[in-house]
Amino acid sequence: MDWKKMTTRAVKVLDYAVPVAISAGLVIWLFHKVRFRDIISVARGECDFVWVAVMMVITTLSHMVRGVRWGIQLRAAGVPRMTVTKESVSIFGAYALNLVFPRLGEVWRCVYISRTEKVPLSTVVGTDFGDRGSDAVVVVALTLLALVVAHPALMSFVRHYQVGRDIINVADDMFLWIGIAVVAGAFWYVCHYLRRYRWVDRMDVSLGKIWQGFKVLFTMKGRGMYVVLTLGIWLCYYMETYVMFQAFPFTRALVHEAGSAWGLIPGLVVFVFGSFSMAIPSNGGLGPWNLAVMFALSLYGIGNTEGAAFAMVMWSFQAAWLVVLGLFSAGYVLCEEKRGSRPTAAGA
């Protein structure tokens, strides 16, 4: 019995099964909390789908801007310049695949660029780490901004809900930070002192190549444009939520509520909660994102049924549109492969 193969297969099964289980479990819990037919009734009777269409246009724009931004990193890492269409296709396909299996899209886009542009996969993976790393910085900055401008609503959450108090308790736990420091120290020790082992040396070489792809963020040409495009991506993401506020009367009311800065502050809170939920492995955010948005809306007095309708309409139409963009990407890649396989005039 080959235990190594069995372990590898088990890990792969868990990689796919755990996100599906999380999504399914949270969706079941959601529909236990609110009735599905009530959600459908709110969506049909109160939603202005013109604003949903506007949201889908902004979604497309955000992915195109992300593709162009990634192109700047790739060129700095030695990848030849690509067309804006190809840069966009790499993102369309990645997000569509993430609906099926979380993180699969990230793998696909790295392999796609590596194969078509004939560059080392580890270099492309490094740029992907840089791409996501810069997003993490933005999420932290947005969180700090939300803590400042939406302090009353967030403090209400911490005071009145057990999960809020639990978050504070975990963050204040000294053993958590000691554990993180121990793990980081052990990893450094292995990489620094156990290089004589082949597997450690291979890991060290791979990490070095990944770092080469990541550090181009700090040395590449076009850093200013990269920052501008990063702001553009996250402005688009925020505007998706803010535009959807206009689609329902109960969220539209927040725009006109005193002290809400024309709905910008509630929009920021909903957006930040939704962004953090994407760290939970699930199929395209289904389950964690919906519940996070519902909870954020509840901070402003919106009931579970209305919050669920808002979240389900926004997620469902975004997911459906990502499938359309994914099909476009598949068609583009297929045509690209056919063009590449045609014999040249010299070789015919």
Image (cartoon, rainbow, N blue to C red):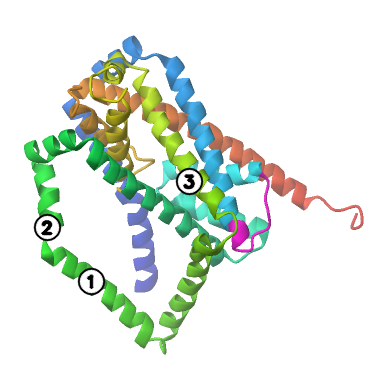
**Residue 82 shown in magenta:** yes
Q: Is residue 51 above or below residue 177?
A: above
Residue furthest top in the image: 45
Tell me residue 319's x, y (percent).
43, 33
What's the residue at 55%, 65% (across, down)? 123
> Which mark is first along the chain, 1 or 2?
2
Q: Is residue 35 visible?
A: no
> Which mark is first along the chain, 3 or 1?
1
- Report, in whole angstroms, how far the alpha carbon at label 2 lies from the one at label 3: 32 Å
Q: Is residue 2 left or right of residue 227?
A: left
Q: Assess disc 2: are there few (<14), some (14-19) or many (≥20) residues with their C-alpha within 10 Å of its C-alpha.
A: few
Would you name the residue on which mark 3 appears?
230
Would you name the residue on which mark 1 appears?
181
Tell me residue 328's x, y (percent).
60, 36
Tell me residue 72's x, y (percent).
59, 53
Determine whether the residue tagged by mark 1 lies in a helix, strand or loop.
Answer: helix
Determine whether the residue tagged by mark 3 lies in a helix, strand or loop.
Answer: helix
> Which mark is first along the chain, 3 or 2?
2
Would you name the residue on which mark 2 appears?
172
Tell me residue 96's x, y (percent).
49, 40
Disc 1 marks a residue whose amino acid type is Ala
Disc 2 marks a residue whose amino acid type is Asp
What's the residue at 60%, 58% (across, down)? 221
Q: Is residue 132 above or below residue 36?
A: below
- Report, in whole angstroms, how far the alpha carbon at label 2 lies from the one at label 1: 15 Å
Q: Assess disc 1: are there few (<14), some (14-19) or many (≥20) residues with their C-alpha within 10 Å of its C-alpha.
A: few
- Camera-side residue of 144 and 316: 144
Disc 3 marks a residue whose amino acid type is Thr
